[in-house]
Image (cartoon, rainbow, N blue to C red):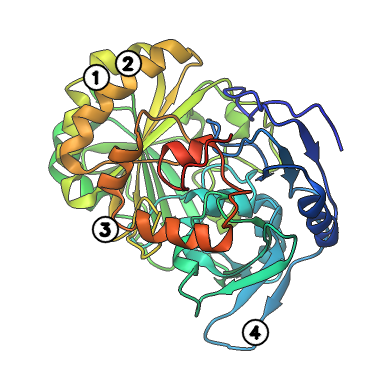
Amino acid sequence: MSDDVGVTWAGTHSFRASRLVEPTTVEEVQEAVRTAPGRVKAIGTRHSFNDLADTDGTLISVLGLQGRPFIDLTDPTHPTVTAPAGIRYGELGAWLQQRGWALHNTGALPHISVAGATSTGTHGSGVRNGCQSTALCRVEFVDARGKLRTVRSTDHELAAVAVGLGAFGILVEASLSIQPTYDVRQDVYTGMPWEVLLAEAPEILADAYSVSIFTTWTEPTVQQVWRKSGMWLDDAVPDEWRGAVRSPGSDARLTTKDPDALTPQGDPGPWNERLPHFRYSGPHAAGEEIQSEYFVPMHAASEAIEAVRAIGETVRPHLIVSELRAVAADELWLSAAYGRDTLAINFTWTRHPGQVSAVLPEIERALAPFGARPHWGKWHAFDAHAIRHVHPRLDDARAVFESLDPEGRFSNTHLEQLGIREARGLA
């Protein structure tokens, strides 16, 4: 146990929890929950940018939970892998690849934990690819009384707890759907005319297994497009594509990070070494940044992109880069892609909190006509009314959380201010 609770990965929030517990077994998690005074919250790799995972009580880390993954082929039509919830995607991906298996997608960073990524609806890109939470088919968690509980794909609660925001318990184990391994090749294109992107945004994002578009909104042509081709799905990689030109891998840059930290480009390789933007084994310093992200329906992609471009001069001064990605629709109640194929618009900001806070309402006003939903773990200016307006199953999710945790031990101010948990007047 430690009183030095620390900060988030990017230094954007200092935790105010009174203590940090770092168990190595599920039994120790259960004991920590039973004996902790007041409220408790789970913490993973600290990649959220706000106070979503904070509490005035005890933080319980899941990173040290021991146990090796195992593959279940009982149902050959639905193979799964079960792993400790705190395992990082980079570690799990390498383990699966060595055995000929794969996940359907990954986020940009392989350093994040399964528990944290699924709990916040973290995603990669691809019009056929759901967010990371859609792979969940079973979760095991410790409830407010320290008891071990399980929710499976056949239980209606999974629609709430899959993107559960730590609002109901401490995840200790997760089972994920897997598939046979596959290769991916990623190539960088530059010089795409804005008129092409605005006319064909959904088609461009659907043109490969995973596509990421990078922009600072005011450049004369689109800064970069990363095209990640599934080698079993896509045609030969073109040198020219929708007005853009394929560039050498050395031309790729993301923010101010070391280019050696980026995953290989120009050559096919295993999914786990191409779908993330950053190498798991590469340099991974703390992020000197703030992030915000908004999700709009894919059918309104071009209009939403144009709406942000219209305020580009306001956005640009404190922006490092924006990334546009596709997320397939799902049925998870608090997913940003619930019920609709989605365009994700991410903003990576310089760490200037005051200036970033000032520009967020302008972005949200620009995207409001499209029913934009914010990323739960990143900076936004939504209140409970605005959240309820864009999340039609919010009340259903809150009812599940309240039934699983009626005393509110896993609640906090952040969740209550957004209407995700009932207000109790405590932090």
Q: How far apart are marks 2 and 1 (CA)?
A: 6 Å
Please tell me whether mark 2 or mark 3 is closer to you in this view.
3
The type of residue carrying mark 2 is: Arg
Nearer to me, 340 or 245: 340
Q: Residue at x 84, y 61 (%)?
A: 27
Q: Which of 83 and 238 is in front in this view?
A: 83
Which residue lies under the disc numbered 1? 312
Residues at discs 2 and 3 in contact (Cβ within 8 Å): no
Q: Which residue is drawn at 67% across and 80% down?
A: 72
Residue 46 vertical position relative to residue 230 in the rendered view, above or below: above
Of the residues under marks 4 and 3, which one precedes in the sequence? 4
- Position of the N terminus, as image quadrant, is top right
On the image, which quarter does residue 234 sit in? bottom left
Residue tagged 4: 73
For numbered disc 3, what is the local secondary structure? loop
Q: Which amino acid does label 3 sit on?
A: Arg
Read off the residue under disc 2: 316
Question: Number of callouts in the render?
Answer: 4
Q: Mark 3 points at which residue?
A: 340
Image location (x, y in percent) of residue 357 = 39, 18
The C terminus: image quadrant:
top right
Q: Do the residues labelled 2 and 1 touch (CB within 8 Å)?
A: yes
Q: Residue at x 35, y 34 (%)?
A: 383
Residue type, mark 4 in image: Leu
Instruction: Name the amino acid type tagged 1.
Output: Gly
The mark nearer the N terminus, 3 or 1, is 1
Q: Nearer the viewer, residue 399 or 333?
A: 399
